[in-house]
Image (tube, helix red, strand yellow):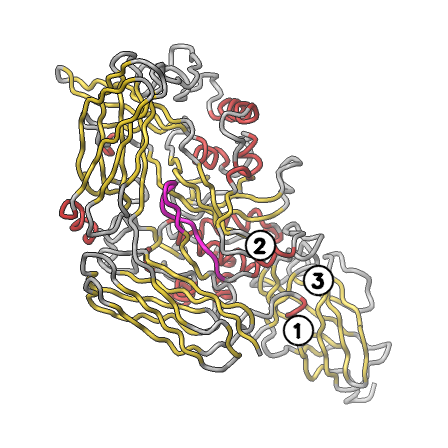
Amino acid sequence: CFPGTDLKVTGVDFLKNQNCPRHHTDAYEIKNLVVRRGQPFLMLLTLSREMKPTDKLSLRFGIGKQPMKVRGTLMSLNPKKEQDLTGWHISIAKINGKECLLSVTSSPSAPVGKYTLNVKTGNNIYQPQNNAIYLLFNPWCKDDVVFLADEAQRNEYVLNDTGYIYVGSAYSISGKPWNFGQFEEYILDACMYLLDKSKLKVNERRDPVPVTRAMSALVNANDDSGVLLGNWSGNYSNGTSPTDWLGSVIILQKYYKTKKPVLYGQCWVFSGVLTTVMRCLGIPCRCVSNFNSAHDTNDNLRVDIYLNASGEPLTSMSFDSVWNFHVWNDVWMKRTDLPAGFDGWQAIDSTPQEQSQGIFRCGPCSVKAVKDGDVYLPFDSRFVYSEVNADEVYWVVKEVNGKKKYTKVGTDTKSIGVHISTKAVGKNKREDITAEYKFPEGSKEERLSMEKATSFLNPSGLVPRARYASTGPMGDAGSKPVVQHEAVSKSGVRLEISHKAALYPGDPLELVITVKTSNPGSWTINLLGSCQLQRYTGKIEANLGCIKETVKLEGKSEKHIPLKVEPDAYMKVLAAVEDVLLIQVIAVAEVQETDDKLTKEVAMGFEYPPITVQMPETAKLNQDFTCAFIFKNKLNVTLDNCKLLVEGLGIFKMATFDEGDIEPGKIIKAEVICTPTRLGEKTIIARLISNVIKTISVEKAITITE
């Protein structure tokens, strides 16, 4: 062989402009090539001379610290060989003089992560610039376990970088706009850092089950200095209040830069960040909000709520709690680790509530298993099942001769796990997915699912549920359970809770408890009513008043009992607590003639004037336009210390405007000069926060054209 005739590689072009659109990865803001597994991509090699049939050439893809063939972490691919044992293969697509076009197809079950590439020709090794290639899960590939057949669903659950997270209460659901931003700068690198930090073996990175489980642990900071530290104290002075985040981008960028947990998160923030991480890695994902979510501490599917003699909740007595809402995630995959029938959506949850095998994480748990009551299946299906299926039991606690006397005043088997919500595919609307998690209340299938679940939750055969008679709050374990059908009271008495006027901060809260009866006869009803300000976790911040009345009703009739709360009673608390507070009303009725007892509980959100956005409907790429945000304070109170937070992915970076105090009737206007850097429909989000108000949000879409 004459010197100088060795075949050498002098350059590699990763052909991003061709590969990325085909792999649906062109939106990632990164220099490197990002591709999805199981799908071919092209690379153009420039050689020192024309390639001959006798020349040896191999591409070497390595993953992890020390890539080795025996570990399956080094793929050495030769175009002459048929498919490699690893399931990867390359072929020569075209040779043109000194240029050689190669087609590379990774295995549809290849480990996901960051690979380095070098090219070996004879004894020469060429290492290209930006030689890290990011390989992601592929919902477009039929052989990938995350394959999702529906194009519109892939666009929503993998590619949409904005969305809504539903919060509030079952009585007043509101959509919180959220920027997921999975394609923004450093987000993919942050996800790769999390994969490395997870200590998953390279083999486990093939499978979305361990990957999603690991990520549900790493998004909270509890065991592993993960992304976000949870805080429900109401004091966030040394960090960012959970209500102030507009999306996941700043959180993940800050985490990647500092490698320290970001302060602070609550459930919707954990869920928003986990959606970003999942979509970024290529696993279809959606945020799921469960209204009246049971945080049941002892697997008995029952939450006991204790009231004092005035009907006010005694939160210190209960270990269980009901959150007005809780947000987790569903991820889409085949469950090769489970018996057939449990593929599809799997629940995962990164809010640190309970440990799973010693670590704060939750899932993946098959949503189908929850619906069918198969709560023995991994992972954490018992916990998820109780969040959507527990019963509420109300007890009035009175001191009698120095001892506590418990009187059961009501059971609600229907209020937990209602209006389970996610953003609809392709529309800015709420989609109710309760039917994916549970059968209709009272149906035969629901009863069978419940029986199956309780047999696993409590194998002794005793079912300590509110549906069964029990002598006291803890139940009498010695006696056989007697099934109590939900009592339809002889008197036909029902309770309703409503409000007469809009619930604006600074105005009196004009609440109404309505007592109705549908049966003939004379009825004397002892009514207790109480009103509290509470956080979404059910924690009471202030008791705002209670009523105690005896109501007489004849035959089919109704009576409205007003419960009015003056602004002085609640405005100080509203301003002092950094969380969003809800108005909770609990009513307890006892019918003297029949001894029927019933309870009703409703949580309502405050109402606010809107922010309006003025901007064109379309704009041109890289051409400036102005976006204006206008807010008029229609409330009767001054909004102290107002900030307007705005963010538009692909249009402008997050900005904060200090607006000071906004008096009643005053109008503020803020303007942002926007320079769109990406095509397609883009969303702008704005939020106004003040001492009193934490949740006025608006989002508006604009289409960017060439």
Q: Which range is magenta?
A: 162-174
Q: CA distance from mark 2 to mark 3?
A: 16 Å
Image mark for residue 118: 1
Relative vertical location of residue 358 with respect to residue 220 in this rendering, above or below: above
Dominant SS type (magenta): strand
Q: Nearer the viewer, residue 661 or 611?
A: 611
Q: Residues within 10 Å of mark 1 (few under 14, many from 20)?
A: some
Residue 215 place in picture, x, y as percent:
49, 52
Q: Where is mark 3, residue-wise?
A: 39
Q: Nearer the viewer, residue 40 or 517?
A: 517
Task: Specify the amino acid type for callout 2.
Answer: Ile
Q: Is label 2 or label 1 in front? A: 2
User: Which residue is drawn at the image coordinates 24% and 69% (left, top)?
Assistant: 659
Residue 40 place in picture, x, y as percent:
72, 65
Relative vertical location of residue 378 with respect to residue 505 in this rendering, above or below: above
Q: Quadrant of residue 609?
A: bottom left
SS label for mark 1: strand
Task: Specify the amino acid type for callout 1.
Answer: Asn
